[in-house]
Amino acid sequence: MMKNILEVNGLTKKYDNFELKNVSFNLPRGMIMGFIGENGAGKTTTIKSILDIIKDYSGKVKIFNLDYRSHEAEIKEEIGVVLDDMFFPEILTAQDIDNVMRGIYKNWDSNLFNNYLKDFDLPRNKQIKTLSKGMHKKLEIATALAHHPKLLILDEPTSGLDPVARSEVIDIFQDFIQNDDCSILFSTHITTDLEQIADYITFINDGEIVLSKTKDELLDEYGIVKCHEEEFNKISKKDYVKYKKNKCEYEVLVENKREFKKKYKFEVIDKMTLDDLMVLMIKGEK
Amino acid sequence: MIGFIRKDLAMIKSNFKLLAILTIVYLGMSLAGQMDISFILPFMCVMIMISTFSYDEFNNWNAYVVTFPNGRKNSVKAKYIATLLMIVIVTIITTILSFIISYVRTSTIDYINILEMTFGLIFGTLLVQTFMYPIIYKFGIEKGRIAIFIIVFGIVISGGLLSQFIDLSGVLNALSFLENYWVITIIILSVLLTYGSYRISLAIEMKKNF
Amino acid sequence: MEIIISNSSGVPIYEQIIEQIKSKIVANELTPGQLLPSIRNLAKDLRCSVITTKNAYDELERQGYVKTIPAKGVYVNEINRDLAREEQLKKIEKILDSAVVLAKINNLSRKEIDDILDILYEEDK
């Protein structure tokens, strides 16, 4: 049985003012991976490349252990996507989507789709353009799920949703992975969603993967040391990842807080959140 | 692929009212003996199909379909088939109406004339489609409009210039034998042009980065 | 099975799961042979990641509290209740120890400590 549902290897793509540099990570089967990074860090470009929406990248993408060139249709039968700003023409209705998708996916399940519409309180016969932003997102999610995909690729699926709707959507994602054949790649800048349900975190900054590991390891091992300048000066450069100088203290990101504690005996080592990680990695200095 | 055709038909559904009104106008004007506007319905159809491109573009549908099985290929194919379907249906309606109009006005039916018109309509609308679709796929609907304008302008100018320097009568004479085979010529030409246009659009779409 | 997870307590979620399942087993709320929710089910109920619940079950299994039967699920093990109780007692002792240290620093009498304990026990009822 295959271990990784998705393998991204050495993805490289140059634009005039931006570059994806050798992006690599693996998504194991049955897991949820949170893909985090600033706006413009390369999340969407990576996802578009994985989906073949961008074609002229170098590097290799394997989905279900298959290559696009030889198995495109097969792979895409089993992927569901929610993409930022890409969807059905807005003069169509949910009913139209049902009719259309029945002619596109072998496994399209009208019953399942209708159940989602009911669960989400979405109207069948209203044009998409009349829906609120939240309802629009929910319709996209329902559409992505109704052909029983094995892999969900979601670009900012919770953006624009209020907390209640976000919670509903998170429930649906967790329902989805009750089947251990199913996996999710989920890009977002709302890290609280991920702090709960993600199994893996992949962090991209300025077109480069900074880290990709299990969330439990990450939150368990990394820590934030708060100290004064004189203490900070005692820390050797190799013992921290990044630091940020605030008004009355230094915030120092360390990779292994237990080791650090042993070595330096500092009092205040805080638990790190994903937000802290992002801020320090992006704004911090070395 | 049937899904993509359904999607295009669902999109033009809202234009059916307009087509119905145009049909009545067409009937009215023809029965009243005004000018011949039998071209209006088929041409409206092509224009409505072209308008579907704007909606597609507005919601990035063309990028979204890439995530479907064989999405790039099937969406282009479906666009051509849906257009053909519309042209054929509307041309048949126009033809039938022409029979009726002809009968009402003159108590006879001018079969040859009407059938000539039918073939002319199909050929004319297909020409528009085959010409415009690859340009729209290449440049998008906004820039495509400009591109179409420039190309048409270019053809007219260069055609005009050419005819100044080259005697085309020889070519026309050589082609004149086709006159007796015009039906078959138009059919073959239509098929070739549509197929060629489809292949070009497909090649553009298969390579596109969104 | 009722498990309450705090996201702000600072205790890692998987440790909270382990502790709570353990005490349920010791208290006989979970009886030997009882089927526990699957890792995916538990993850959904607790809104945490699958890896977290898997780690918790793995650790419980290592300590002998549960047993995984492949393709069937995770079951509560027959445990040595005395040993488990012993372990819990040690923990209580440790917590009380720090309370006593603090009490002595502040010159609290034994009576006062007893009163606090009485109140805490009452509150819990």
Image: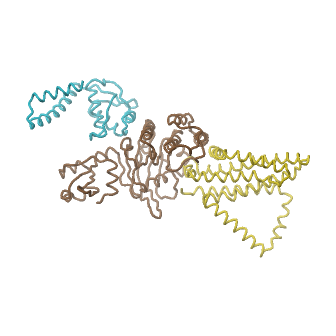
Chain colours: A brown, B yellow, C cyan
Q: Position of residue A213 (x, y in %)?
A: 35, 48
Q: Is residue A57 in view?
A: yes
Q: Is residue A78 visible?
A: no
Q: Quadrant of the N terminus of chain A?
A: top left
Q: Tell me what residue is drawn at x 60 percent, y 58 percent.
A: B140
Report the residue at 54% width, 43% height from top: A131
Given residues B164 and A184, the one toward you in this image is: B164
Horizontally, is A150 left or right of A262 in the view? right
Q: Residue furthest bottom?
A: B165
Q: Give the camera-side residue of A142 and B21.
A: B21
Where C66 falls versus B191 (above or below)?
above
Q: Quadrant of residue A196?
A: top left
Residue A95 spot, x, y in % from top left: 60, 39
Q: Position of residue B147 (x, y in %)?
A: 64, 63
Rendering coords of residue A208 (x, y %)? 39, 57
Q: Quadrant of residue B156?
A: bottom right
